[in-house]
């Protein structure tokens, strides 16, 4: 009898796990910083399929068939942008995510130019080819940019799974609060170094 009950419980657990797996949202992400933000908002309601491994660099990455499958099988795609990940531009444009993928650089550029929304030329350049001239593609180095991505991810996940809206909203609030505390701590620690000169060995960082 005990063995029968055990089998029943195991079956129920397996069924529950299968239902959870089926209800989760699959998100294809480009690199680790993107995955971290998506995970912070999606929590255990999302499955992340990162394309560029943590040991690889997006600067010289070559897309494989298995990576293309991650894009095609995903419910949502989140990437940095063409300037950093040119290998993703055409695959995304030719997929079902052409109009729904979240491009981090577009969010940052849109925020920087939100007062120029009436400029038709700017808007046209923003949507044709995903080019962002003059914008540093390493957008994750700025906490404000992380907040922009978190907001976009939250909205996208709510659209995909409205029944989990409160869960995503709570995770977003926690994320925002954590970054605010971290920013305050960093500012205090770096205040004593504000007058020091430094050298950065990277072509994208000019000071």
Image (cartoon, rainbow, N blue to C red):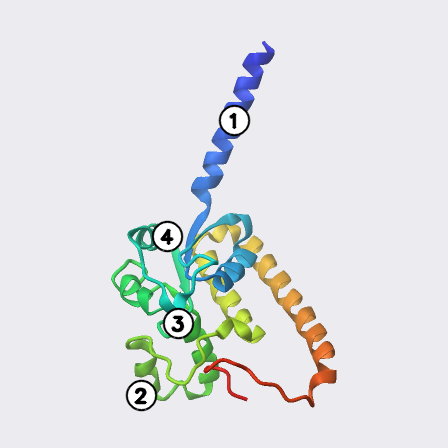
Circle number at residue 165: none
Would you say the residues marked 1 and 3 are in contact, meaning their CB atoms lie under 8 Å apart? no
Q: Which of the labelled discs sits on residue 74, or is there none?
A: 4
Horizontal and vertical percent position of residue 140: 52, 71
Against 20, residue 111 (above or below) is: below
**Pointer 1 residue:** 12
Foreground tag (2 vs 4): 4
Marks 2,4: beta carbons within 8 A: no
Q: Which residue is mark 3?
A: 84
Q: Earlier in the sequence, mark 2 or mark 4?
A: 4
Q: Position of residue 58 (x, y in %)?
A: 40, 66
Distance from label 4 to label 1 (Cα)?
Answer: 27 Å
Q: Is 27 situated left or right of 173 in this image?
A: left
Q: Earlier in the sequence, mark 2 or mark 3?
A: 3
Report the Cα–Cα distance between label 2 and label 1. Answer: 58 Å
Instruction: Say which residue appears at 73% left-offset and 77% top-offset.
Output: 189
Q: Secondary structure at mark 1?
A: helix
> Measured from the top left, where is residue 170 in percent x and y?
61, 58
Secondary element under disc 2, as helix, strand or loop, is: helix
Front one among 161 and 107 = 107
Pointer 2 residue: 121
Residue 97 in the figure: left or right of residue 114: left
């Amino acid at each position: 009898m005990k063995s029968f009950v055990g089998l029943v419980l195991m079956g129920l657990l397996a069924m529950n796990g299968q239902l959870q797996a089926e209800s989760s949202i699959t998100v294809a992400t480009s690199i680790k910083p993107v995955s971290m933000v998506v995970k912070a908002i999606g929590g255990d309601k999302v499955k992340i399929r990162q394309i560029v491994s943590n040991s690889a660099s997006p600067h010289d990455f070559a897309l494989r068939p298995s990576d293309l499958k991650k894009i095609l099988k995903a419910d949502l795609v989140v990437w940095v942008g063409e300037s950093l990940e040119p290998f993703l531009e055409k695959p995304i444009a030719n997929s079902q995510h052409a109009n729904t993928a979240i491009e981090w650089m577009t969010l940052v550029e849109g925020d920087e130019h939100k007062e120029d929304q009436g400029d038709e030329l700017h808007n046209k350049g923003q949507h044709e080819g995903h080019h962002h001239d003059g914008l540093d593609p390493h957008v994750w180095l700025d906490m404000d940019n992380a907040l922009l991505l978190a907001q976009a991810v939250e909205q996208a996940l709510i659209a995909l799974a409205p029944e989990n809206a409160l869960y995503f909203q709570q995770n977003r609030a926690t994320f925002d609060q954590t970054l605010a505390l971290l920013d305050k701590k960093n500012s205090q620690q770096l205040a004593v170094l504000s007058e020091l000169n430094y050298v950065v060995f990277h072509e994208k960082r000019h000071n």
